[in-house]
Amino acid sequence: MSSTSLGLVKHYCVSQTYEGYTLFAPMSGGGVWLIDMKGQIVHHWETKNTPASHAVLLSNGNLLFAGKRMDSPIQIGGSGGELLEMDWDGNVIWQYEDLYMHHDFERLANGNTLVLRWVPIPEDLVEKVDGGVPGTELEGQIWSDLLR
């Protein structure tokens, strides 16, 4: 365990908090950090790409991280492109790439991984979609979510 601090904890009132750790992936990049209640760095994973959304610690101690690929055809908030499972030493032990993946993911109890991705709405459904702002379509298409 490192004794280095990121200077993130300004005030720590033991009686008003639950003991634990905080895992975060700054949108500015630099990897994923695990800190204790006093702001001491417990662990740091370097990542090639900035986060698309977030990272989670799995029950086996590995990190599951969604990264933002700059070659993704959709470059709006939450766009991603890669999902990495990294061990404690930062080795990538599993990787999934989908340039249309975005925002969220979930590792299921059976070991499968659920991801959210963008898909264009079929033309025959476009007229049935209420709402939206005309002219905000991406590449002339309305996009929706798909679970994979």
Image (spheres, rainbow, N blue to C red):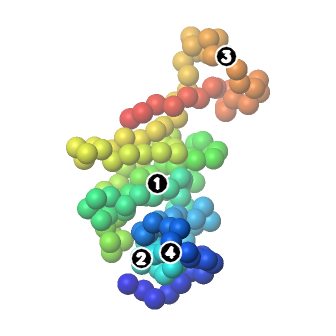
Q: Which mark is residue 43?
A: 2
Residue at disc 4, secondary structure: helix
Mark 1 burial class by Cα count in 10 Å: few <14, some 14-19, many 20+: many
Mark 2 burial class by Cα count in 10 Å: few <14, some 14-19, many 20+: some
Instruction: Check disc 3 and report the residue beneath it.
Output: 130
Q: Earlier in the sequence, mark 1 or mark 3?
A: 1
Please determine whether, in this image, residue 56 is positioned above or below residue 87.
above
How far across and down, in percent of the image, does residue 122 sit? 54, 18
- What's the amino acid at mark 1? Ala
In whole angstroms, how far apart are the C-alphas of marks 1 and 4?
Answer: 32 Å
How far across and down, in percent of the image, does residue 105 sit? 42, 45
Residue 67 visible in the snapshot: yes
Front disc: 3 or 4: 4
How far across and down, in percent of the image, does residue 41 sit? 47, 80
Instruction: Check disc 1 and report the residue beneath it.
Output: 66
Residue 99 visible in the snapshot: no
Instruction: Check disc 4 and report the residue beneath it.
Output: 14
Tell me, yes or no, whether the two marked residues, 2 and 1, touch with CB atoms within 8 Å. no
In whole angstroms, how far apart are the C-alphas of marks 1 and 3?
Answer: 31 Å
In whole angstroms, how far apart are the C-alphas of marks 2 and 1?
Answer: 18 Å
| Residue plotted at (50% across, 56% down) | 54
Please determine whether, in this image, residue 27 is positioned above or below residue 116.
below
Left or right placement of residue 41 versus residue 132 in this view: left
Q: Nearer the viewer, residue 125 or 42?
A: 42
Q: Which mark is residue 6?
A: none
Mark 4 burial class by Cα count in 10 Å: few <14, some 14-19, many 20+: few
